[in-house]
């Protein structure tokens, strides 16, 4: 299954997702969607109770929704329950939420945007820019962040070309890069910046983004 991980934003809340190139379908983290729709402080527990309360839905989720690898808030890759657009529509039917209808419209728009982006890749960056602006980032920072995403992808594509796999190997090499300019691993740098579950790169300054981009670009060129 070829996939591209992404973060989608609905009403200023992040939803992990990935695009399955083989199926040409978006898949979304079910737990993230439940958190958005219910504002639950424990969406995992809410999902467990929902599946018990609605046995038909429980069977449907167990039969149709795959466990896929997605990044956690700490950056680690973990298996999480995911659902396609049509599967989410079925799940939403069992969740009493005033956000249900707006969320359905949002899902339909996300699907349309991806089809448009296949025809014009520049739209992917435009969407990311819109999402970051919605979260309050400045235009200057957004431009740096989008460039850092591009360089990071070029680097990880190079690693994959050499047979490396996402997960532990990528994390280990990333720590080596951080040590070259910050003298800290990614985890240590997050602690240094006072971050817990937040994304490290989304909390870097322009200067930090530039330095890290140069380190990753140099690594790719050396490879």
Image: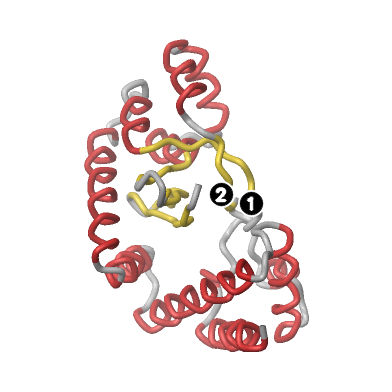
Mark 2 residue crowding within 10 angstroms, few (<14) / some (14–19) / many (20+): many
- Residue 70: mark in rendering: 2
Mark before the other along the chain sequence, 2 or 1: 2
Q: Position of residue 196 (x, y in %)?
A: 65, 58
* Front position in the image: 162 or 123: 162
Q: Going by the image, does 179 lie left or right of 43?
A: right
What is the quadrant of residue 107 in the picture? top left
Say which quadrant the C terminus sits in: bottom right
* Front position in the image: 3 or 94: 3
Q: Position of residue 124 (x, y in %)?
A: 33, 66
Residue at mark 2 to residue at mark 1: CA–CA distance: 5 Å
Q: Are discs 2 and 1 less than 8 Å apart at CB?
A: yes
Q: Position of residue 199 (x, y in %)?
A: 56, 63
Say above or below: 56 vs 7. Answer: above
Say above or below: 150 vs 101. Answer: below
What is the quadrant of residue 116 in the picture? bottom left
* Front position in the image: 198 or 172: 172
The residue depicted at 35 percent of the width and 48 percent of the height is 24
- Residue 77: mark in rendering: 1
């Amino acid at each position: 299954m070829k996939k591209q991980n992404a973060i989608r934003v609905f009403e200023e809340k992040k939803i992990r997702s990935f695009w399955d190139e083989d199926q040409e379908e978006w898949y979304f983290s079910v737990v993230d969607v439940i958190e958005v729709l219910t504002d639950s402080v424990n969406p995992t527990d809410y999902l467990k109770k929902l599946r018990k309360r609605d046995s038909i839905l429980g069977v449907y989720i167990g039969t149709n929704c795959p466990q896929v690898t997605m990044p956690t808030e700490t950056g680690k890759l973990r298996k999480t329950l995911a659902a396609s657009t049509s599967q989410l529509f079925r799940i939403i039917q069992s969740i009493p939420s005033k956000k249900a209808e707006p969320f359905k419209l949002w899902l339909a728009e996300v699907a349309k945007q991806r089809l448009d982006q296949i025809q014009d890749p520049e739209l992917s960056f435009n969407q990311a820019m819109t999402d970051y602006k919605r979260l309050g980032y400045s235009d200057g920072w957004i431009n740096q962040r989008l460039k850092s995403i591009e360089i990071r992808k070029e680097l990880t594509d190079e690693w994959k070309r050499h047979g490396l796999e996402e997960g532990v190997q990528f994390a280990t090499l990333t720590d080596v890069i951080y040590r070259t300019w910050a003298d800290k691993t990614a985890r240590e740098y997050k602690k240094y910046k006072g971050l817990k579950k937040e994304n490290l790169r989304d909390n870097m300054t322009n200067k930090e983004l530039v330095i890290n981009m140069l380190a990753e670009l140099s690594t790719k060129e050396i490879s």
